[in-house]
């Protein structure tokens, strides 16, 4: 990641608002620090924070209350951050971290003739060409690109690009300020999304007809800083973008970037981001599969890359945050019609080939724009559900770290129109406990709230998924049950369906979903699924009853808690021997983070048979002052915690005081 910038900087007033003075960013400037002030921070406190490091407030991102402070030359970055963080009125301080592009430069063999080789293979693989028979891009849909700028005069982009915006406040040596693309990457990304179809020798964008709002946040070398990217995302949200494509990333989990993403999401925008190119490591990766931001933030649709063989691209980062995959290997698209920084490295003008998750992400952004062109009422969350649910599952069944939900399928996504499907599930008869691997006949009452009747021809079926405690699909697609009779609009049916429990014990979410075979899951169109919590165990079962909980616990002081435990399983609990059952506890932060894994143990007074109970005195010691979740859990020593075997623990919200 680059951190050396050009000789002088002019703040881009179209995005940033000026501070007390405009700081000159150069190789002799001090560290750039992003500061989040408290809402009631005074002007004096803000100025004092900057003065504490001999700097000035260079600019602000007002919608998310972030100021960029340029410290005095020679100041240590971490020392300056620590100094500002201690100042009155400051909520948070962090470095203005560098960001990088998420593309892999191709071998020159791929750049010599992009038209007689693979062509636009990605459009054929994802059936975009067939989806065009159903919908074309609407000019009312705006897709923002946060990138290296764009060539708005390119023949394939004329009419598709809104007035480009310069969001750069700092550049590397040899680069220039301005909204034009002097790298090639941004124009390539814009072409994948919205290149026109009227240029005989050109290429076609996934959603030709939509409008692209190009915001330049990276310089000619593809380098930049978090603050410019965050400001660009905020600008996109404030100027009508329904989709924001971010084909770049950083390994720094920045509060400023996170808040910018949330700001855009709160205004209805879908953030589509490249998952990263650390699948094999490399000079820009500290380690293999290094996490990339903003791709890993909640609600962001992170896109991995696939090859011409519909396999995982080796360079593509694998991780739990990957949402879907899309073609990203040897992608032909538009490049500036003039020489750029990349021209000296083999990139051709007008059209060229690039590889990377940077190329996979705009294909998905284009797909989202196509869907919105057909149904603009869909929310960002519904867009993600639609795209994920209609993807072609590759790799391990269900979600996996290489492909997410699968490689996107534009035809299936477009063929699942919102506002048509509807279902309501009554899961009241679902048992709360099943044995591992057991086959059970479970009756679910399903009400048809679709705009059409469900026919008994097997096309509409009830299916289920098992979701584990981490949110991953333990069983993606269980047995499917056809409706034996027609279910009219607003009609209901008690449908017995065969359910097979997972073979690993644990607490699971049993999720019911109606599917139209070959088209879509109902949940992909925004229909809520029918969920029920089920404990899958090997015969263990327990319930917890607690005497009045003390109003507060003390740090380091054991306080007795009377807990009555009842054996609700089918096997007895042993009070002695090599594997006795005991009562213990965990301390969890409100966000679920484990603060203390296990506390003191309380032994059983005697063996407890199924259906029997015992009251134990458990000594509970508070960790640090604050609010916590106190989780009670039984453990079979040397074997497992009951919660890990599918038995629900007991959670209590408590406070700990000094």
Image (cartoon, rainbow, N blue to C red):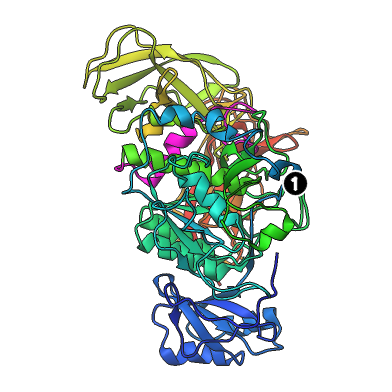
Q: Does the magenta-highlighted stretch encompass residue 402?
A: yes
**Residue drawn at (62%, 73%), measured in percent from left and top?**
171
Q: Main SS type for the magenta part?
A: loop
Left or right, residue 433 beside residue 586:
left
* 180, above or below 62, in the image: above
Left or right, residue 76 beside residue 392:
right
Report the quarter where the C terminus lies.
bottom right
Whether residue 531 is visible to the viewer of this picture, yes or no, is no
- The residue labelled by disc 1 is 108
Residue 494 appears at what percent x and percent y?
Answer: 31, 15
**Residue drawn at (68%, 75%), measured in percent from left and top?**
173
Residue 136 appears at what percent x and percent y?
Answer: 37, 37
Mark 1 Cα shell of 10 Å, populated few (<14), some (14-19), many (≥20): few
Q: Depth check: 465 or 65 in front? A: 65
* 408, above or below 229, in the image: above
Report the quarter where the N terminus lies.
bottom right
Helix, strand or loop at disc 1?
A: helix
**Residue drawn at (36%, 29%), measured in percent from left and top?**
134
* 407, above or below 362, in the image: above
Part of the protein shown in magenta? 376-405
Q: Quadrant of residue 620?
A: bottom right
Q: Does the magenta-highlighted stretch encompass residue 261?
A: no
Residue 638 appears at what percent x and percent y?
Answer: 75, 37
**Residue drawn at (38%, 38%), measured in percent from left and top?**
371
* 554, above or below 286, in the image: below
Q: Depth check: 511 or 450 in front? A: 450
């Amino acid at each position: 990641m680059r951190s050396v910038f050009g000789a002088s900087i002019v703040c881009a007033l179209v995005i940033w608002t000026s501070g007390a003075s405009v700081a000159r960013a150069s190789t002799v400037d001090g560290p750039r620090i992003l500061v989040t002030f408290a809402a009631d921070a005074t002007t004096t406190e803000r100025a004092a924070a900057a003065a504490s490091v001999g700097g000035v407030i260079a600019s602000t991102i007002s919608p998310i209350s972030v100021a960029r402070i340029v410290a005095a030359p020679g100041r240590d970055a971490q020392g300056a951050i620590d100094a500002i963080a201690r100042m009155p009125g400051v909520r948070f301080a962090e470095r203005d971290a560098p960001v990088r592009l998420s593309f892999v430069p191709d071998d020159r063999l791929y750049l010599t003739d992009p038209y007689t080789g693979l062509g636009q293979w990605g459009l054929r693989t994802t059936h975009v060409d067939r989806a065009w028979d159903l919908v074309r891009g609407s000019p009312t849909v705006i897709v923002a690109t946060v990138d290296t700028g764009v060539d708005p005069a390119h023949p394939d982009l004329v009419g598709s690009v809104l007035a480009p915006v310069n969001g750069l406040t700092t550049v590397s040596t040899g680069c220039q300020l301005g909204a034009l693309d002097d790298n090639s990457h941004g124009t390539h990304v814009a072409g994948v999304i919205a290149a026109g179809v009227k240029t005989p020798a050109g290429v076609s964008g996934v959603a030709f007809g939509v409008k692209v709002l190009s915001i330049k946040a990276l310089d000619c070398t593809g380098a930049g800083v978090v603050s410019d990217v965050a400001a660009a995302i905020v600008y996109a949200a404030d100027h009508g973008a329904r989709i924001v494509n971010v084909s770049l990333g950083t390994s720094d989990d920045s509060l400023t970037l996170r808040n910018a993403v949330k700001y855009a999401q709160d205004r209805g925008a879908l953030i589509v981001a490249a998952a990263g190119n650390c699948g094999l490591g490399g000079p820009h990766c500290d380690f293999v599969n290094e996490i990339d931001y903003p791709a890993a933030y909640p609600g962001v649709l992170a896109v991995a890359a696939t090859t011409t063989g519909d396999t995982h691209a080796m360079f593509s980062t694998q991780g739990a945050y990957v949402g879907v995959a899309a073609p990203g290997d040897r992608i032909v698209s538009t490049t500036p019609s003039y020489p750029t920084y990349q021209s000296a490295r083999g990139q051709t003008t007008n059209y060229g080939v690039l590889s990377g998750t940077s190329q996979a992400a705009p294909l998905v952004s284009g797909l989202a724009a196509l869907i919105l062109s057909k149904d603009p009422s869909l929310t960002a969350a519904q867009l993600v559900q639609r795209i994920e649910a209609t993807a072609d599952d590759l790799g391990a069944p269900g979600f996996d770290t290489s492909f997410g939900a699968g490689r996107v399928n534009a035809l299936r996504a477009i063929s699942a129109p919102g506002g048509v499907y509807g279902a309501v599930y009554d899961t009241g008869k679902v048992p709360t406990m099943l044995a591992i691997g057991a086959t059970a006949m479970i009756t679910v009452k399903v009400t048809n709230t679709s705009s059409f009747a469900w026919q008994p021809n097997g096309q509409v079926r009830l299916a289920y998924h098992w979701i584990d405690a981490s949110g991953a699909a333990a069983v993606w697609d269980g047995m499917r049950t056809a409706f034996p009779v027609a279910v009219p609009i607003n009609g209901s049916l008690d449908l017995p369906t065969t359910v097979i429990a997972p073979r690993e014990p644990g607490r699971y979410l049993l999720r019911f979903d109606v599917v139209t075979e070959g088209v879509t899951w109902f949940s992909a169109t925004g229909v809520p699924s029918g969920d029920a919590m089920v404990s899958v165990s090997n015969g263990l079962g327990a319930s917890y009853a607690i005497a009045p909980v003390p109003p507060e616990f003390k740090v380091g002081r054991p306080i007795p808690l009377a807990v009555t435990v009842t054996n609700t399983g089918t096997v007895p609990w042993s009070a002695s021997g090599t594997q006795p059952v005991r009562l213990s506890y965990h301390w969890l932060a409100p966000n679920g983070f484990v603060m203390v894994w296990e506390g003191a143990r309380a032994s059983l007074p005697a063996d407890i048979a199924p259906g029997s109970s015992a009251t134990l005195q458990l000594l509970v010691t508070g960790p640090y002052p604050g609010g916590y979740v106190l989780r009670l859990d039984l453990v079979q020593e040397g074997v497992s915690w009951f919660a890990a075997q599918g038995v629900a623990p007991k959670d209590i919200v408590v406070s700990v005081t000094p």
